[in-house]
Image (cartoon, coloured by chain):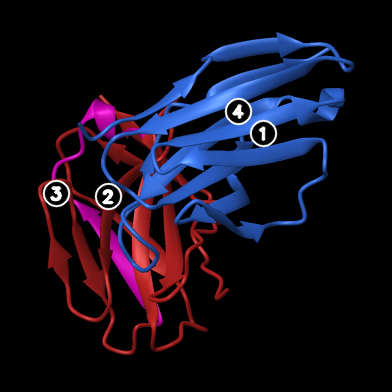
Chain colours: A blue, B red
């Protein structure tokens, strides 16, 4: 199984809602990543977890709250988002830190009304 | 992180080879050169990576200049399915991050 699965594929939420994005991999990878991608722009790194601990936070606003409950799962909790947070949110995983490849999911497309 | 420079867009005819250039003049000795591509409506997909020597895999070849200040991704025979944005990325061997640049949008003409 070489897949990174993201759910939901599409999410529409209001600015006062609380929702979560979920990412799952069963490749035994110990590094997991969240990226944000706006239309026609490259993906922007948000968070990196290494061995279930947050190792990188790229100055992301606190309305985005990541969680890594175990080595296979990565969540992104969303609260009080703004319309400009509408984007494609991509999850990725890699075996460890270092030069190896990242495996990406297909993303969750978020629309904030 | 060291930067890369790529052309914004390129075109290729179907079934012809494609050479996608990347400049990385500030590369450090521990930076690996990675290439990813992103097809429409999909997440990025790993293509190839290398350090100093040229590399080949089933998807592509990576040619690295002797001074490592530039590299070229070679698709030997472009198909319509190769139409995508191709990203050239430098990644330190000890890093647990991957920063995307603006990439090259490849259009394949039937």
For mark 2, what is the residue?
A: B47
Residue B80 falls inside the magenta stretch: yes
Q: Mark 2–mark 3 contact, CB under 8 Å?
A: no
In terms of depth relative to the viewer, which is nearer, A38 or B75?
A38
Q: Are marks 4 and 1 in contact (CB under 8 Å)?
A: yes
Q: Chain of mark 4?
A: A
Q: Residue furthest front?
A: A69
Residue position marked by numbered label 1 in the rendering: A38
Whichever of callouts 2 and 3 sits on the residue coming sooner in the sequence is 2
| Residue in the image at 51% along x and 68% along y | B4
Which residue is the site of mark 3? B76
User: Which residue is at a point 28% across and 81% down the rendered structure image?
Assistant: B65
Query: Dots 4 and 2: beta carbons under 8 Å?
Result: no
In the rendered view of the protein, which quadrant contains the C terminus of chain B? top left
**Left or right relative to B77: residue A98:** right
Give the mark toward the camera: 4 or 3: 4
Decide: few, some or many residues near mark 3? Use Cα within 10 Å; few <14, some 14-19, many ≥20: some
Q: CA distance from mark 1 to mark 3?
A: 31 Å
Question: Distance of mark 4 from mark 2, alpha carbons?
Answer: 21 Å
> Which chain does the residue under circle 3 lie in?
B
- A23 left or right of A43 in image: left
Q: Nearer the viewer, mark 4 or mark 1?
A: 4
Q: Secondary structure at mark 3?
A: loop
Residue A88's disc is 4
């Amino acid at each position: 199984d070489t897949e990174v699965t993201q759910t939901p594929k599409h999410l529409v939420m209001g600015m006062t809602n609380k929702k979560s994005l979920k990412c799952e991999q069963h490749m035994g990878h110990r590094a997991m990543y969240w990226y944000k991608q706006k239309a026609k722009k490259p993906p922007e790194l948000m968070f990196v977890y290494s061995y279930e601990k947050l190792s990188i936070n790229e100055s992301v606003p606190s309305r985005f709250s990541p969680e890594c409950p175990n080595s296979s799962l990565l969540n992104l909790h969303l609260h009080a988002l703004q319309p400009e947070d509408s984007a494609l949110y991509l999850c990725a995983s890699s075996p460890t830190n270092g030069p190896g490849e990242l495996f990406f999911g297909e993303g969750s497309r978020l629309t904030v009304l | 992180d060291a930067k890369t420079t790529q052309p914004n867009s390129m075109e290729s005819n179907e079934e012809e080879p494609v050479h996608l250039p990347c400049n990385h003049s500030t590369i450090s000795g521990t930076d690996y050169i990675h290439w990813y591509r992103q097809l429409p409506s999909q997440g990025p997909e790993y293509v190839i990576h290398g350090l100093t020597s040229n590399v080949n895999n089933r998807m592509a070849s990576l040619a690295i200049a002797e001074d490592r200040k530039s590299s070229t991704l070679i698709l030997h025979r472009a198909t319509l399915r190769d139409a995508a944005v191709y990203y050239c990325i430098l990644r330190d061997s000890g890093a647990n991050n991957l920063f995307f640049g603006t990439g090259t949008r490849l259009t394949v003409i039937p």
